Image (cartoon, rainbow, N blue to C red):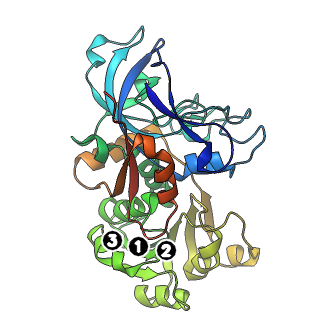
């Protein structure tokens, strides 16, 4: 089969298109023919060493082992099964829950042995991938490319919104609203939880589409009076913030939160370190949440919402698998709306 490997830490020249044997499904596993694999920040940061370049560079204590096939947002068809898996699974179109864990229900995402496909396991930048049968879910849409964009970004966004316990009519500020997680934060908060959404983007040309996703207001983070713009748009401070940017908008986010407000972060594309005056947190009675991925129950609820038409896929562009380097480079460019998807060309 054709696959794209990460050979080590560095730039896109560490990605190599190679031929590999098709993997064998072990006990309790299935072989999935990959039909589409969306790109996430996680595999780029892994390659760049943003999680570290030592023994703690991955989700597991031993770090990432190279070469590794990245890719976590996967849709495809089960073509073979391992022992203990019913043959009736063959031919089933599925999306893959993106990690394994021994954590009890509801705590899978915070277990010490949480291991991510595309980091600790070879992932979807390939024609085929092996995965536990119990972590394969029915594809929510009848299109592989559209179904592939939700597993990581969608689960991350869904968990963020559930943590905030948004109530109908509350206002939430969404940073990075044009990205994979951000655009789904807008949809989930507005369409599922009936919150009012203020979406922050760099390019206001995206306003109409974000309003179609449910945003009440769309503002540019480039404004020199951004905090005032947010408070004016809402008629006062906001109830909550869903953030994937980090340092660049952190001070503004805390400034516009009401007393008793909630802030949830699941990304740091705009800076991984920041200055924090603790007085802001305790004098305003703020609650801060760190968030990544989510639970299997949340994943199931998200897939139900997708199948019901409450959430729609947002795709900026597709690339053939062999152009993974170009796709990752494009992923980092500003002004996109939605996900970038790799499409294997082999059968």
Q: Is residue 152 left or right of residue 214?
A: right
Residue 157 appears in the figure: yes
Q: Is 114 located above or below residue 279 in the figure?
A: above
Q: Position of residue 139 (x, y in %)?
A: 29, 37
Cα distance, mark 3 to mark 1?
18 Å
Q: Secondary structure at mark 1?
A: loop
Q: Residue at x 45, y 35 (%)?
A: 124
Q: Position of residue 215 (x, y in %)?
A: 34, 73
Q: Nearer the viewer, residue 76 or 303?
A: 76
Q: Total of numbered circles in the picture?
A: 3
Cα distance, mark 3 to mark 2?
20 Å
Q: Secondary structure at mark 3?
A: helix
Residue for badge 2: 239
Q: Secondary structure at mark 2?
A: strand
Q: Are marks 2 and 1 in contact (CB under 8 Å)?
A: yes
Q: Nearer the viewer, residue 333 or 308?
A: 333
Work out which residue is located at the far right of the displayed protein and give it. Answer: 54
Q: Quadrant of the N terminus?
A: top left
Which label's residue is closer to the chain start, 3 or 1?
1
Q: Nearer the viewer, residue 107 or 9?
A: 9
Cα distance, mark 2 to mark 1?
6 Å
Residue for badge 3: 210
Q: Is 77 located above or below residue 28 in the figure?
A: below
Q: Is 236 located above or below residue 277 in the figure?
A: below
Q: Is residue 247 left or right of residue 116?
A: right
Residue for badge 1: 170
Which label's residue is closer to the chain start, 3 or 2?
3
- Label 2, residues with CA under 10 Å away: few <14, some 14-19, many ≥20: many
């Amino acid at each position: 089969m054709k696959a794209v490997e990460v050979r080590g830490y560095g730039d896109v020249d560490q990605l190599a298109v190679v031929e590999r044997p098709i993997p064998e499904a072990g006990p309790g596993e299935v072989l999935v023919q990959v039909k589409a694999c969306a790109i996430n920040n996680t595999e780029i940061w892994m390659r760049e060493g943003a999680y570290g370049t030592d023994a703690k560079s991955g989700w597991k204590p031993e770090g990432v082992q190279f070469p590794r096939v990245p890719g976590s947002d996967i849709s495809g068809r089960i073509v073979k099964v391992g022992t203990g898996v019913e043959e009736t699974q063959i031919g089933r179109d599925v999306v893959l829950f993106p990690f394994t864990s021994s954590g009890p229900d509801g705590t899978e995402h915070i277990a010490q042995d949480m291991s991510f496909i595309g980091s600790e396991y070879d992932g979807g930048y390939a024609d085929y991938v092996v995965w536990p049968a119990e972590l394969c879910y029915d594809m929510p849409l009848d299109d592989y490319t559209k179904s592939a964009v939700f597993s990581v970004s969608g689960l991350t966004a869904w968990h963020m919104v559930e943590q905030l316990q948004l109530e109908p009519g509350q206002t939430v500020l969404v940073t990075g609203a044009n990205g994979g997680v951000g655009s789904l934060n807008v949809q989930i908060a507005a369409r599922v939880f009936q919150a009012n959404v203020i979406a922050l983007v760099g390019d206001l040309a995206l306003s109409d589409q974000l309003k179609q996703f449910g945003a009440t207001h769309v503002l540019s983070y480039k404004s020199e009076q951004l905090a005032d713009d947010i408070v004016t748009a809402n008629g006062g401070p906001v109830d909550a913030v869903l953030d994937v940017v980090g340092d660049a908008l952190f001070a503004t986010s805390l400034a516009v939160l009401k007393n008793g407000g909630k802030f949830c972060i699941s990304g740091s594309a705009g800076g991984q370190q920041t200055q924090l005056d603790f007085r802001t947190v305790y004098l305003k009675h703020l609650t801060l949440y760190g968030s990544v991925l989510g639970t299997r129950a949340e994943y199931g609820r998200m897939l139900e919402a997708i199948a019901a038409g409450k959430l729609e896929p947002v795709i900026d562009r597709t690339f053939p698998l062999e152009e993974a380097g170009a796709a990752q480079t494009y992923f980092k460019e500003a002004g996109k709306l939605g996900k970038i998807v790799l499409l294997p060309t082999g059968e």
